[in-house]
C-alpha cells in the first residue's frame, strides 16, 4: 500500500516544477510522513493549486472563449463523422462482395468514402491538437478542470445544443427546425433516422464506436497539444533563482505567440480541411539545441529522424562567414546563435536559421594570443555557449564569462579577464542549474557558480579545472554537479558548492566531459585510459567504487556517447581510432582502423552515430557493439571541423574554421 | 488586507528568520496554533504571498534529513512586514475593549 501511495505521490508531483517537487519531497522526508500521509498532502496540494488557478481571470476567459466553443464544435463534428462512418461502415461490412471492387461505380464510391473519412479524421486530429496547444498555452495552472469540462462539453454539448435549438424553434416558435441556418447539416443526426435503427441498436455501433472516435481523434490529440504547450520553455526576463512559485504560474510570451500562430492554423484546418497545415506552426521546441552536447549534454541530436534512404549528398542551404572558433552553434526556434572571434573581439551573432541572414551581432574586446602549442587552433573561443531562460552565457578563450540577452544581444554582465590567460585557452562550456551558471572560468579556475541574473559568484568548489565541462545529474537521489578537475572528479552540491565526493583522477591530461551510464560516471584522459566509477551514499557518507578501467583506449578532447550499453568514442592512440566499449564491464568490443582523425566530434541519434572528423568528413554509422559499421560519408566543409555539429531535425549546422553552414538531409 | 493564514505564515517566517523554509514554517504554525497546516495550504499561500511581493522565496540547501532535497527558503519583504503590521494593528484595534472570557460559552455575562 505504501509503495502504491508513493507511486501516486510521484505521479501527482509531476504537475509541480522541479524546484517545487524538490522542496515538497524534502518537507515530506523531514516531517517523516508515511506514504499515505504524503499522498493525502499531495492530493491537497494538487487540488488547492487547481483551485488557486481559478482565482485569476484567465481560466474563466479560456473556459468561455475556447473550451466551450471548441468542445461544442469538435463534439458536433465528431458526432457527424461517427454517424456517417457508422452507417457506411455497417453497410459495407454487412453487404460486402468482391463485385464492389470489380465494378467501377461502387469501387469509386468506396474509395471516395475511405478518402473522405481519412481526411475528416486527419482534420479532426489536427484541429484537436491545435486546440490543445491553444488551451495549454493560454492556461497552465487550471488546466485540469478545463480539460474535464472540455470532455463534458465534447460528449454532451452537441446533444444539449440540439435540444435547446429544437426547444426554442420547435416548441416555442412553432417553426420547422430546418429554418435554422445549417440545421440540416449540424442538428440532424443519422442515428435519428428510423432506417438506421438496426445499425445503431448494436452495442459496437451504438455505444462503443461513438466513444472511440472522440477519444482517439479528439481527446488524445488534444492532450498531446496541451502537453506540447506545457513542454514549451517559458521565456522570463531573468526570474533567476528567486520566485520559485511565481515562476510556475507564468505564461511566457512564447506560449502566447505559439497560441496565436496555432489559432491561425486552426482556422485554416477548419475552413479548408487542410490537414497538413498543423505542421506550419512554429518549429517544435524539441528541435532546439540550446547548449554544449545537446539538451541533456549527452551528445544526442535534437528530434532527428533517420531518412529511409541515405542520400548520396547533403543539400547545402546556406553558408555564412561568422568568425573563428570551435563553439557549437545553438539552435532555438528559428534562430541560430554562434560565438566566435572577430579581430580582438569575442562576438555573439544571431542568424536566421532558414536563411543564414544575420539578425544581430554583439561582443566585447578580448585580445588573446594563443600559446605556441595551441597556435594552430587559433584564438577563437573553444567553449560552447548556453541558452537558458532567454539569456546566452559564454566562456571566452581568455576565461571571461559573459551573459547576453538572447532577444537583442545586449551584454548583461561579464567577468574581468584573469591576470594570466589560460595557456591552452579556456574550453569548459557553461551549465545552468537552479538559477546558477556553473563553469570553470578564468585561468582554469575551480568549478564556479555565478548568479545567472547578476553574475555574482555564489560559490566555488574543488581544484583547478581544465577543458572538461560540468554536467548536472541525480546520483543516489541527490542532485549534483559532476566535473573533472586537474587532479580528481568531484560531485558538488548545487545548493552550496559543497564537495560531496571526490574520485582521484588525472584530469589534467585531456578534456572529455564526464559521461553518465546508469549510476556510473565514465571519464577519460590522454594518460589515464578510461575509468568508470560509481558514487553512492552509504550510512550518510559518499563512496566512489571503481566499476572498471581500461588502458587499451584513451580519449583526449573527443567526447564519447553511450548508446544502449555501449560507449562509442575516438581513442587518441594510433593517430585516432574509433572504439566501442561495453559500458557494463569496460571490455573493449572493437577497435577501428588507425589514423582515422586527430579529433572526431561525436553525436548520436537513436542507434546512429554521427562522426565529424577534423578533416571535414562526416561519417554516419550504426551504433553497433559488434563492429564499426559506417553507413555513409559526406564532406561538409572546406576547412577543418573541430566544433561539435548541431543536429536538429533534418538539419546539420556545421562550424568550420570561420564559416557556419546549414546542410539538410533531403 | 491579509488573510488570517497569510498573517500566521508571515509571522512564523519572521520568527524563524534565516531558518524560514516550508517544513519549518509548517511546524512553527502547528506548534503555536495547535492547528494542522497542510502542504497544500502552505505552498499555495506562499505562492500567493510571493506574487503579491510580500515574501521572497528561493531554493536553498539540501540536507541529509531531507533526503538530499533542497529547501524552499522564505524571507519576508519590507512590504510583507508592513502588511502584517497593518493586520496586527487592525486586529488589536478592533479587539480593544472586548473581553473574550466574558463571552466564552458557559460564562454568564
Image: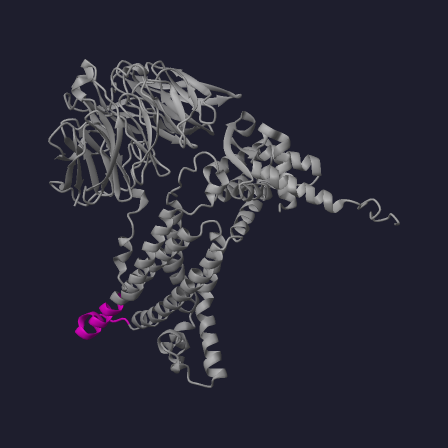
Quadrant (top left/top right/bottom left/bottom right) for the N terminus of chain A? top right
- What span is colored magenta in the figure? A96-114
Residue A595, picture quadrant:
top left
Q: Which of these two is toward me, A643 or A457?
A: A457
Query: Magenta span has A59?
Result: no
Residue A385: % across, % down:
30, 31
**Relative to A155, is A166 above or below?**
below
Q: Residue at x 51, y 29 (%)?
A: B60
Q: Main secondary structure of the magenta part?
A: helix
Residue A215, image quadrant: bottom left
Give the left or right position of residue A62, taking residue A310 as reference.
right
Q: Is residue A473 visible?
A: yes
Q: How many labels does the image show?
A: 0
Residue nearest the viewer, comparing A150 with A348: A348
Q: Which residue is drawn at 29% across and 73% down?
A: A95
Give yes or no for residue A111 being in the magenta stretch: yes
Name the one closer to the observer, A152 or A373: A373
Image coordinates for residue B98, horizontal then vertical, percent: 79, 46
Q: Where is residue A101 in the image (x, y as percent from the top left)?
A: 20, 69
Side of A171 relative to A408 (left or right): right
Residue A503 position, x and y percent, is 40, 16
Give residue A231's quadrant in the image. top left
Q: What colour scheme does the image use? A: one colour
Residue A328 visible in the shown view = no
Image position of A10 with respect to A51: above or below: above
At horizontal 62% and vertical 45% (from top left) the residue drawn is B2
- Farthest-out residue, right: B108
Residue situated furthest bottom in the rendering: A174
Locate residue A666 relative to residue B51 in the image: left or right. left
Amino acid at each position: 500500500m505504501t509503495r502504491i501511495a508513493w507511486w501516486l505521490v510521484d505521479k501527482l508531483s509531476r504537475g509541480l516544477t522541479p524546484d517545487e517537487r524538490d522542496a515538497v519531497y524534502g518537507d515530506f522526508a523531514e516531517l517523516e510522513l508515511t506514504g499515505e500521509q504524503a499522498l493525502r498532502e499531495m492530493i491537497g496540494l494538487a487540488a488547492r493549486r487547481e483551485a488557486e488557478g481559478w482565482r485569476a481571470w484567465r481560466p474563466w476567459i479560456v473556459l468561455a472563449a475556447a473550451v466551450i466553443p471548441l468542445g461544442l464544435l469538435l463534439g458536433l463534428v465528431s458526432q457527424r463523422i461517427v454517424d456517417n462512418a457508422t452507417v457506411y461502415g455497417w453497410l459495407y461490412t454487412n453487404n460486402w462482395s468482391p463485385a464492389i471492387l470489380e465494378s467501377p461505380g461502387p469501387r469509386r464510391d468506396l474509395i471516395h468514402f475511405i478518402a473522405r473519412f481519412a481526411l475528416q479524421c486527419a482534420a479532426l486530429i489536427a484541429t484537436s491538437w491545435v486546440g490543445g496547444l491553444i488551451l495549454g498555452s493560454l492556461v497552465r495552472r487550471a488546466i485540469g478542470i478545463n480539460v474535464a469540462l472540455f470532455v463534458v462539453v465534447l460528449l454532451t454539448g452537441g446533444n444539449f445544443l440540439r435540444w435547446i435549438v429544437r426547444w426554442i424553434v420547435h416548441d416555442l416558435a412553432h417553426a420547422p427546425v430546418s429554418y435554422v441556418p445549417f440545421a440540416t447539416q449540424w442538428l440532424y443526426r443519422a442515428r435519428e433516422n428510423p432506417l438506421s435503427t438496426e445499425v445503431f441498436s448494436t452495442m459496437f455501433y451504438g455505444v462503443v464506436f461513438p466513444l472511440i472516435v472522440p477519444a482517439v481523434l479528439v481527446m488524445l490529440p488534444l492532450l498531446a497539444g496541451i502537453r506540447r504547450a506545457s513542454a514549451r520553455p517559458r521565456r522570463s526576463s531573468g526570474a533567476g533563482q528567486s520566485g520559485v512559485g511565481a515562476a510556475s504560474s507564468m505564461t511566457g510570451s512564447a506560449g502566447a505567440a505559439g497560441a496565436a500562430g496555432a489559432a491561425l492554423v486552426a482556422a485554416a484546418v477548419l475552413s479548408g480541411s487542410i490537414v497538413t497545415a498543423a505542421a506550419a506552426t512554429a518549429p517544435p521546441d524539441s528541435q532546439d539545441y540550446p547548449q554544449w552536447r545537446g539538451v541533456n549534454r549527452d551528445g544526442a541530436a535534437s528530434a532527428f529522424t533517420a531518412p529511409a534512404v541515405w542520400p548520396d549528398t547533403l543539400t547545402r542551404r546556406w553558408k555564412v562567414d561568422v568568425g573563428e572558433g570551435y563553439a557549437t552553434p545553438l539552435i532555438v526556434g528559428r534562430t541560430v546563435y554562434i560565438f566566435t572571434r572577430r579581430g580582438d573581439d569575442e562576438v555573439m551573432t544571431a542568424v536566421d536559421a532558414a536563411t543564414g541572414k544575420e539578425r544581430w551581432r554583439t561582443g566585447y574586446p578580448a585580445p588573446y594570443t594563443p600559446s605556441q602549442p595551441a597556435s594552430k587552433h587559433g584564438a577563437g573561443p573553444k567553449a560552447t555557449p548556453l541558452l537558458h531562460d532567454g539569456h546566452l552565457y559564454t566562456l571566452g578563450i581568455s576565461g571571461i564569462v559573459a551573459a547576453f540577452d538572447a532577444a537583442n544581444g545586449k551584454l548583461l554582465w561579464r567577468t574581468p579577464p584573469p591576470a594570466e590567460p589560460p595557456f591552452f585557452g579556456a574550453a569548459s562550456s557553461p551549465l545552468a542549474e537552479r538559477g546558477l551558471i556553473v563553469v570553470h572560468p578564468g585561468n582554469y579556475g575551480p568549478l564556479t557558480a555565478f548568479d545567472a541574473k547578476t553574475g555574482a559568484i555564489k560559490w566555488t568548489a574543488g581544484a583547478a579545472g581544465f577543458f572538461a565541462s560540468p554536467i548536472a545529474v541525480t546520483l543516489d537521489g541527490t542532485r549534483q554537479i559532476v566535473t573533472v578537475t586537474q587532479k580528481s572528479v568531484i560531485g558538488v552540491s548545487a545548493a552550496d558548492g559543497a564537495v560531496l565526493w571526490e574520485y582521484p583522477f588525472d584530469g589534467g591530461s585531456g578534456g572529455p566531459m564526464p559521461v553518465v551510464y546508469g549510476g556510473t560516471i565514465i571519464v577519460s584522459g590522454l594518460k589515464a585510459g578510461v575509468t568508470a566509477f560509481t558514487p553512492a551514499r552509504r550510512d550518510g557518507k559518499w563512496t566512489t567504487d571503481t566499476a572498471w578501467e581500461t588502458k587499451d583506449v584513451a580519449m583526449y578532447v573527443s567526447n564519447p556517447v553511450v548508446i544502449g550499453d555501449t560507449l562509442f568514442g575516438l581513442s587518441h592512440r594510433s593517430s585516432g581510432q574509433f572504439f566501442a566499449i561495453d559500458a557494463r564491464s569496460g571490455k573493449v568490443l572493437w577497435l577501428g582502423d588507425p589514423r582515422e582523425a586527430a579529433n572526431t566530434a561525436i553525436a548520436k541519434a537513436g542507434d546512429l552515430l554521427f562522426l565529424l572528423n577534423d578533416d571535414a568528413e562526416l561519417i554516419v554509422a550504426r551504433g553497433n557493439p559488434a563492429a564499426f559499421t559506417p553507413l555513409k560519408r559526406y564532406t561538409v566543409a572546406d576547412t577543418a571541423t573541430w566544433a561539435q555539429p548541431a543536429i536538429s531535425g533534418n538539419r546539420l549546422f556545421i562550424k568550420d574554421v570561420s564559416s557556419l553552414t546549414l546542410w539538410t538531409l533531403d | 488586507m491579509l488573510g488570517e493564514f497569510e498573517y500566521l505564515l508571515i509571522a512564523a517566517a519572521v520568527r524563524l528568520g534565516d531558518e524560514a523554509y516550508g517544513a519549518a514554517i509548517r511546524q512553527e504554525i502547528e506548534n503555536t496554533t495547535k492547528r494542522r497546516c497542510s502542504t497544500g495550504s502552505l505552498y499555495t499561500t506562499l505562492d500567493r504571498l510571493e506574487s503579491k511581493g510580500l515574501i521572497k522565496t528561493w531554493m536553498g540547501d539540501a540536507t541529509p534529513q531531507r533526503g538530499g532535497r533542497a529547501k524552499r527558503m522564505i524571507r519576508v519583504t519590507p512590504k510583507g512586514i508592513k502588511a502584517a503590521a497593518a493586520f496586527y494593528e487592525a486586529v488589536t484595534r478592533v479587539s480593544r475593549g472586548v473581553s473574550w472570557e466574558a463571552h466564552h460559552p458557559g460564562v454568564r455575562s
